[in-house]
Every structure is written in C-alpha cells, then in structure tokens.
Image (cartoon, rainbow, N blue to C red):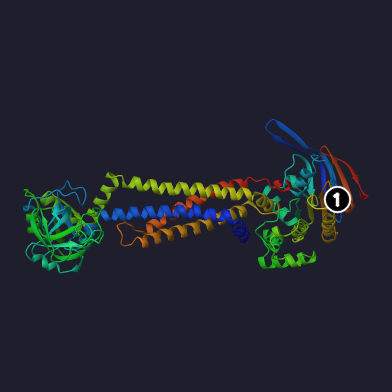
Amino acid sequence: MFSNGTAVHILNVTKTFVTGQARVQALRGVDLNARTGELLMLVGPSGCGKTTLISVIAGILNHDEGDCIVFGENLKDMAQGKKTLFRGANVGFVFQAYNLIPSLTVTENVAVPLLITGTPRKEALARAIEFLERINLGDKLNALPGTLSGGQQQRVAIARALVHSPRLIVCDEPTSALDADTGRLVMEVLRNTALSSDRAIIVVTHDNRIFNFADRIARMDDGRIVLVEPQVATA
Amino acid sequence: MYRIALKMLMGDRGKYLGLIMGLTFAALLITQQSSIFTGLMTRTYSFIDDLSQPDIWVMDPKVQFVDDVKPLQDTQLFRVRGVQGVEWAVPLYKGLLKARLEDGNFQIVNLLGLDDATLIGGPPVMLEGSLHDLRRQDAIIVNDVGANTRLAKKPKEPGGKVVPVKVGDVLEINDKRAVVVGICQVKRTFQSQPVIYTTYSRATTFAPKERKLLSFVLVKAAEGTDLKVLTERIKRSTGLAAYTAQEFKDLTFNYYMKSTGIPINFGIAVMLGFLVGTAIAGQTFYNFTLENLRYFGTLKAMGTVNGVLLRMILLQALVVGVIGFGLGVGGAALFGYLMKGTELSFRLIPEILLLSGAAILIIIILSAVISIRKVMKLEPAIVFKA
C-alpha cells in the first residue's frame, strides 16, 4: 500500500493494445512499488512490457485496469489536462534517442521543462547553466546538440530531466546508444546528481553493464513482474 | 515557449525557406495579377476621369459603357439645357475614325470633339501648345503616347528610331486636313488608339455624314442642386439616360466585369496563385510538423498542454505567413514600380493588400490546421519509441 517513502505504487495494472483485429496484452496485471531515494531498474527481454509500464507510470499512456498511484495521485482518475500538468511538475524524462531539440542550444534545451512550467526565461536559463556546470558541461552552453557526442547529449538530457526538480525520473534505455565507458559515465552522473531522498528513479534497460547502478531490479516477462531483486551483482 | 517555436521553425532552414517561398509566390501572384486586373479595369473608365468638369453625362439610354457610343440628334443638347437645375450643357463627340499618316499608312484614332465655345472636356495636361490653339484652322491636339508610337513617322534610316509627331505636322482624318497644334497627356484608356482632340464642329466634319453625331451631353449642375434629383429630372424631361460621373464609371466597370472574359482570366491566375501557395505551404508545413513530431511529443510528455502547442504552431504559421506576405507584396510593388510608364496597367490599391492578406491567412490556417490536428492527436508515449 501507499506509504511515506513510496513514490510509485502499481497494483494489478493491465494494458492491451488493439490494432484492427490484433490484440496485444502488454501488461497483464503488474504489481510494483518504487521508493523515494532509490534507483529501480526495469529489465527484461524485448516486448515484455517495460516501456509500456514506464509510459503508464510517467502518465503518458493510459492503462486499462488497476491503479497507478504516483506520489499519492491515482493517474487512472486524473483528467488528461491535469495529467499533463502533473507530468510537467513531477516527472523528468531521459530518452534513448536523447530527444534534444536540434535548433536549440544546450542551455535552451535544458531550460525547456522550466519554461513549460512558467518559469521566466532569464531565470530558467540561469538554472539550466547551473545544472550544466554541475555535470561538467559548462563549456558547451551555447553548443547545438548536433555538435555533441552521444554521451554529452545524454548528460544534457539528464540535466533537462532534473532542472525543474521533479520527484520522479523515468529513463528509457539511457545507455543503449552509448559505448560501455560512456554508458557508465552517464549512469554515474544520473546516480550522483539525480538520486535524493525525495526522488525516485526508474530506468528501463536491457544493458546488463549498468545493472550495478541499481538499488533494486524488477525483472519483467510477458507483461508481468516476475522477480524483484534487492541486490545486484555486476554482470 | 514561443521562442522555442520560432527556433524550431527557423532551425530547419530548408523547410523554413521553402515555406516562405511558397507563400511569397502566392502573395506575389495574387497581388500582381489583382493589381494588373484593377489597373486594366480602371482604364475602362479613365476617359470619364479625365473629364472632371461635368457633373452629369447624358446619353442614349442604350449605351452600356463609355466606348459604346450611340449618337443623339444635336437637338437633344437644347432639351437638356432647358432642364431646371442645369448650369450649363455642352456637346461632346467621341468616335473612332481613320487617320492617314504622312507615310500613307492608316491608323484608327479616337477622336474627341469639344464644345467650340468653351472647349470643355479638353485634355487634363497640355505638354506642348495650348487648348485654345484648337480654335485655329484644322487644328487637332494629339496625345503624347499616340504621337510617339502609332502616329509616329517611319525612321529616317533603316533600323533607326521612329520620329514622333510634333506640332505643325499634318495628318488626314477621313480625307480632311488636320494640323497638329498641341501635344497633350491623357490617362491610358482601355482602347489603345491614339487620342485626338478637336472642336465639336470640326469633329463632325471629320466624321462620316450621319443624321446623329452627338455622342454625349456634358452637364454641370447649378449650385445647390442635388445630382440625383437632377439626373432623374433630365431622364424624365428628355427620355435620355443621365448618370453622374461615378454612376457612369460604375456602368462601364460593371459592363466589363459582366460581359467580358477579363475577370475570369485574371480570376484563374489569382486562384492558381492561391492553390499553388496552399499546396506548397501546406505540404511543406505538414512535412515540417511530421519531422518535428518527436519533439512536439517530447514537449507534450514534459508537460506542455495542447493549448500551448496549438499556439506554437499557429505562431510558426503566422510568422512564415507575414514574411511571405511581405515579400510577395513587396515583390509585386517593385514589379509595378519597374513597369511604371510602360503599356502595362498596374494599380495596387489597399483593397488588394487586404485580399492578398486574407488569401495568405487562409493558406496558413489551412496549413496549420492539418499540422495542429496531427499534434493534438499525438500520443506522448511515442517519445519512448527510439
């Protein structure tokens, strides 16, 4: 049940995709808790429902049945507009393909979540610069994303996910496009910068090189959580 | 967020320029063709504009436009003069006659015969000579364009320049001697023939013999007389048609609008500009949105509400619309400026700017609506698709 220290409480969540005659049951009654102050990894084979599950948790995909409670708010009961505002205030995203807007500078990209929530531009840019300096990208403030390496772009994406101080960070395959060293560097930045006692991080990955950065690992298969491991050994 | 929208728009240089080019082309074509159309239609009644003194034009009731002369008997002039409220009424001859040039060639001319006593209805600008020179024997005044082109003499040597008609030169109109005593400037008319002024009595001697030769009676209303009332009174008293100058212009304009293919031809060109502009801008804007769908999805996932996304797209459309409109209208104005003084009729009036602006607005709204629909229906979960 939901209690202090619980960031996300998932109870019997189902989701079925219907395309014409075809029905794909992506989530078949998922139960899961994510706590504040922890980095939870969702792992499993391709098509097991990892991405669908974090999409539901992040409030960007409606589920069919069950409850998805994020920081005390049941997303199932929430209207679409309210859910959008809830995401803006509470969720930070890190994407596999970075999704940095190519025509904006690094600083402007990082400032976007603050601008979305109505922070004045000047203040938003100042906060973005502060975050970029914290992750050693102070020399790339005015660079365009296209001029950065993959690792640098993902660090910018992490700064963007954190800049508005969300309580939940969801990451989808954040290291799959990076080499092993860069992947580890990105995870170090994520863990060191993002993890705090009032925030939860959920990382979807099938990259076993980064499993050791997790506090817990939830293994999924065929739309269900099959195992939650509290401790992990490096693969 | 609006700055982000603009940066997204301008960051994709190829599509941004493609959008502006499409809208510029549409605005240019719509404005230019509409201006030429307006210029052409203005020419249909420019002869009425040149005769600024009379308040009312009296003519045969069957006349449909200014060049559709249906002569009256000379006695009608006196009947009009007898109508209460008429300050003065003078005759005007207008007809197409054949002039024989010095080299033996013939040229159709637009001959205007002015009241012998007052010379009312004379050209608005005299470049050489004086209107009163028409009182000299066989005198005519020729317009400058006619003098320099159709009435001009052959070059003195092969390949040389034509020699304009000048004061003192002699023409023959319907086998009668006509001496050029002045050169004038008149507004371009719909017809391209040279314009020749002479007195009414001389014009009737130039013209082939007919029972009726009076083309129009030009009327000045007595001070304080209501023009509407006076035209009605003239109609009732004489059985003729009487129009104020504006009414006569409208009659002429409407005739050309309804009875010629001019509006359709220009309308097709304007519609073509609109359709091509819509196709180019709509397609490019849609492609731009499709290519940025991932970023719109990212913004949506990060908490941007649909209303803000809608305004961002509208702003993008508005910016390219304004720039395209400005460049297109500017290009059309430049075209008009460069064509000044040529045969081309070009009249850019505020109404055309409004028409062009409205057309561009419709184009960008149509373009934006397709993109807005796509973004509004966008599922933010697409952001997790690599």
Q: Position of B138 compared to B150: left or right?
A: left
Residue B265, image x, y percentages = 35, 46
Chain of the residue displaying label 1: A
For badge 1, the amino acid type reads Leu
Using the image as rendered, state which of residue B53 and residue B282 is in the foreground: B282
Using the image as rendered, state which of residue A196 and residue B103 is in the foreground: B103
Asked if one can make out residue B311 in the rendered structure from this viewpoint, the answer is: no
Identified at 22% across, 53% down, the residue is: B248
Q: Position of A185 compared to B153: left or right?
A: right
According to the picture, the residue beneath numbered tag 1 turns out to be A40
Residue B145, image x, y percentages = 23, 60
Residue A112, image x, y percentages = 69, 59
Q: Position of B226 compared to B214: left or right?
A: right
Identified at 79% across, 66% down, the residue is: A134
**Quadrant housing residue A218:** top right
Total label count? 1
